[in-house]
Image: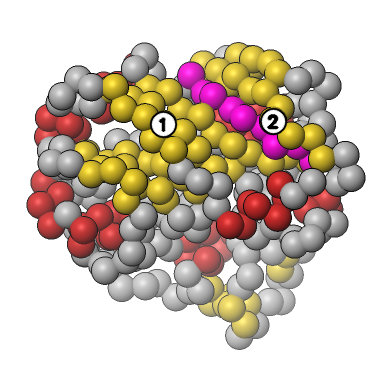
Amino acid sequence: MQRLDKAILTTHPDFSRSRIEGLVKAGFVTVNGAVAEKAGMKVSDDDEIVVEIPPPVPAIPEPEAIPLDVVYEDDDMLVVNKAPGMVVHPAPGHFTGTLVNALLHHCPNLSGIGGVARPGIVHRLDQDTSGLIVVAKSQAAMDGLVKAFASHKSIEKTYLTIVHGRPRLDAGRIENLIGRHPVDRKRMAIVERNGKLAITNWKVVVRRIATTTSLIECRIETGRTHQIRVHMASLGCPVIGDKVYGKGALDKQLDPVPQRQMLHAWKLVLWHPVRNEKMSFEAPIPADMRPYLIT
C-alpha cells in the first residue's frame, strides 16, 4: 500500500505534488473507476489509477459575476470580506470561482494592476480562512501596499480563531522562525534555521469550560504562510477544523463538526497608500463560527 500521490509520481514524474493534489481535488483522478477522494488516500499495486489531463486554461483569468462583500472601495483600493472556501487567485484545481475572477468582474480596469495572473492582489488568505483582504485598484496603490505589507510597519492585522484546549496563560507573544517542514513539504513548521521570522501576539477572549475550547485574538506582526495555525498548534491548542495542523478526533466531537478551519481575519488597520490617511476596517464573525462561541 502507498499514497495515491506517490503512485501517480511513478507514472508522471514531471508532476509536482501541488499539481497532483489540484488534479485530485478537481476530480481528474479515478481509482478503480471511482473519483479519488484525496491525494493521500491509500492505494495498492493492483488498483487501476487513471489521471485525466485537463485541457490548458487561459493564462489570463476571466471575469466572473461572483458576489463580493465589499467593506470599502475608492478609486485606488477596495477591502473585501472574503467568504470561507474562496480561493484568492487561480491555481491548479482552482482556475475559476476565485477572488480574482470576481474582482475582474467587479473592477473591469483591474487587469493591468500588478500582473495579469494576480491583478490587484497584495496579500493572501488561505482558502478556508475568512475575513478582510485589501486589493489595489491603481498602480500607485499597488506599489504602496506591497511596500507596506512587505515591511509590516504600517499594517495591523488582527485575527480571531477558535482553538481546542485552553492556553496555560491568558496572553503571550510567540516569536520564532517558520519554514517548510523538513519531511512534509506541504506543511510549515517552527524551525531552527532556514526559516523566516514569525511573530504572533495572542490573548484569550473566551474560555468555554464545557467544551474545552477557546476564542483567541491574534495580532500578527509578520505574515508567514500558515503562521497562526502553526503557532496555535505549538501552544497545544490547534485551530478547530484545521486539517493540516489540527486534531480531527476532537473536531468530530463538536456539534456541528467544523467544515473548515475556524480562523477569521477580523480587523485591518492601514495607511491609505495614496492619501496617507489611517483607516480601520472590521469584518463580523461569519455564521459558521458562531455556534462555537455560544457559552
Task: Look at label 1 and name its amino acid.
Answer: Leu
Q: Is residue 235 left or right of residue 5?
A: right
Say above or below: 43 vs 21.
below
User: What label does residue 268 carry, if any?
Assistant: 1
Q: Is residue 200 magenta?
A: no
SS assignment at label 2: strand
Q: Earlier in the sequence, mark 1 or mark 2?
A: 2
Q: Is residue 218 magenta?
A: yes
- The residue segment tinted magenta is 213-221
- The residue indicated by pointer 2 is 205
Q: Residue furthest bottom?
A: 33
User: What label does residue 237 carry, if any?
Assistant: none
Number of marks in the rendered image: 2
Q: CA distance from mark 1 to mark 2?
A: 18 Å
Is disc 1 surrounded by few (<14), some (14 to 19) or many (20+) residues within 10 Å? many
Residue drawn 75% across the image and 62% down it: 256
Residue drawn 40% across the image and 61% down it: 94
